[in-house]
Amino acid sequence: MQLDWLVQPLLTQLNTGVLVLDAAHNIVYFNQFIARRADIQLSDVSGRLVYDIFADAPKAWLQRKIDGVLALQSPAFSSWEQRQYIIKLPHLRPVSSGSQHMAQNCSMLPFKAPNSAEQFVCLLIEDATDAYVYQQQLQHSMAQLELANRTDGLTGVFNRRHWQHELGQEIQRAKRYQHPLSLLLFDLDKFKQLNDQYGHQGGDAVLIELSGIIAALLRDTDVLGRYGGEEFGVILPETDMAGALLVANRICAAAAGHQMLFNGHYINATVSIGVSSFSGQTIDELIQQSDIALYNAKRQGRNQAVAWQQQPETYLKKVK
Amino acid sequence: MTELRFTEEQRDCLQELINVAMGLASDKLARYLNTFVHLQVPAIRLVDTEQLPEHFASRYEQQSVTMISLGFFGDQGLRGETIMLYQLANVDVIAKLLGYSNDDSSEAEMLTDISSVLTTTFLNGLAEQLENSFSYAAPRILSSRDQHFADKLASTAEQWQLALQVDIRYQLTDYSFNCDMILLIPGEAMMRLRLILDQFLASF
């Protein structure tokens, strides 16, 4: 059965771009897929250099690829994942695509004319816009998930797990480069009373507003996280005890000086802060020291920052 | 279970065909890439796919490795997959080799480019030796920095019965780079390959 008649209609109907170049990179043929999308006629551009017709194509790169295919007589490929498109063509996905150009997979195949030594390269161009769009959406979702995974749902600051991970990293860094590092743990004073008086929604509102105010006081490199309940932590890289106490006092003053409006009531909330500095402790030891200092701040009347000090009894134990 | 091993004669025959194919590829590549490029005749070993990940994990210990896969199909049921392994430290050398300028292409693109050049040139030569011809799928990056490549290699190699390990080493005037190529062939294709090798052996 003679099937030659099939070739033309197939090439015309094919949902893949077919673009054939001669050894000098001149256009020899393209099918309807390309003609319609690029809005060009073969009779107008036949014999012209491909780079003149598709002026946006990455010329140096494409030249090298095509020369490689000709020299080695082996195929070359290009994926949308590495290069979104080779020639700018519109795609048929009018909605939901972030890009107006067709994402393309391209195979470049060597051909030799049967009765002469003449060489050709055929570019097969497939529309990969769907895959491109799905990957964009996937990446967007992944980024959102990653963010959610390290954020405290209520206050928007880092959650405990991520914050503690960051603390571990900062301790490593401080140890390696012998840089100062300090840690603040702070707690809302009489939070239970706030909750009792204004309800949990009132308490939540205070947590949200205060963490925003405190975040605004910090440097970009400082790391604020919610440690649990009404307790928060701040990692202060490149900061010694004196610097950390300055920051802590600033936080105390800002919290005490801020009035919050909730359901027609003005709420005043204060914080107590425990401060410790890194000098070779483990992460748990450092947190514990800030925690002890925080306890002392509460005991000494709240609304203040207290630095951790070695307890006399443990000090004595060590001397012995 | 079908015996998938090669006889000594089959193995020698295959080795010889691969040597010739690699010789052809070397010649083409050296001329294409640069006259100063010297491609050493590669070392070839038939290996058990189960041992592959372990072997390469110890070989590339403490180095970042990129794996690039390329599938191929031929007539008579011959098919398989090649995996190229690169150390990421070699990327700049590869860029020079291919004539890329720095801003021109991404690392991933350079690696898929060199991979398809290396593997298709070699496989075309091999197909010629086997009186066959291959068509290819586009190369794909299987893993890079963030993933442990040995795990990935283990899950890839699991699907195949035969692995051919080919060491490729380039030497340029001022620097050198080397990479590994693994040729993976599934069981049915291997039986086909054995038949073809037997025909070869019978004709000598």
Image (cartoon, coloured by chain):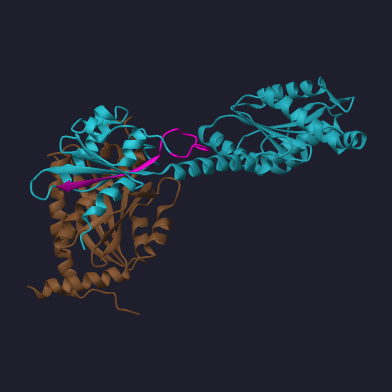
Chain colours: A cyan, B brown
Q: Quadrant of residue B54?
A: bottom left
Image: B116 above or below A45: below
Give percent across and percent down for residue A19: 26, 40
Q: Is residue B39 above or below residue B7?
A: above
Direction bottom: furthest residue: B1
Q: Tell me, yes or no, whether the highlighted magenta stretch contains residue A99.
A: yes
Q: Residue B66: tell me if it is visible.
A: yes
Q: Is residue A49 left or right of residue A77?
A: left
Quadrant containing the C terminus of chain A in the rendered view = top right
Measured as percent of width and height from the top left, residue A54 is found at 29, 30
x and y percentages locating residue A207 in the rendered image: 78, 33
Q: Residue at 65% x, 44% y: name it.
A: A161
Quick one: B81 or A69, which is closer to the camera? A69
* Residue B51 placement: quadrant: bottom left
Residue A281 appears in view: no
State the residue lying farthest toward the right.
A197
Q: Quadrant of the N terminus of chain A?
A: bottom left
Magenta residues, start to end: A92-112
Quadrant in the rendering for residue B45: bottom left
Residue drawn at point x = 25 percent, y = 27 percent: A52
Magenta stretch encompasses residue A159: no
Q: Nearer the viewer, residue A46 or A239?
A: A46
Side (left or right) of A97 relative to A78: right
> Toward the viewer: A27 or A303?
A27
Number of residue marks: 0
Residue A41 percent coordinates (x, y)? 27, 33
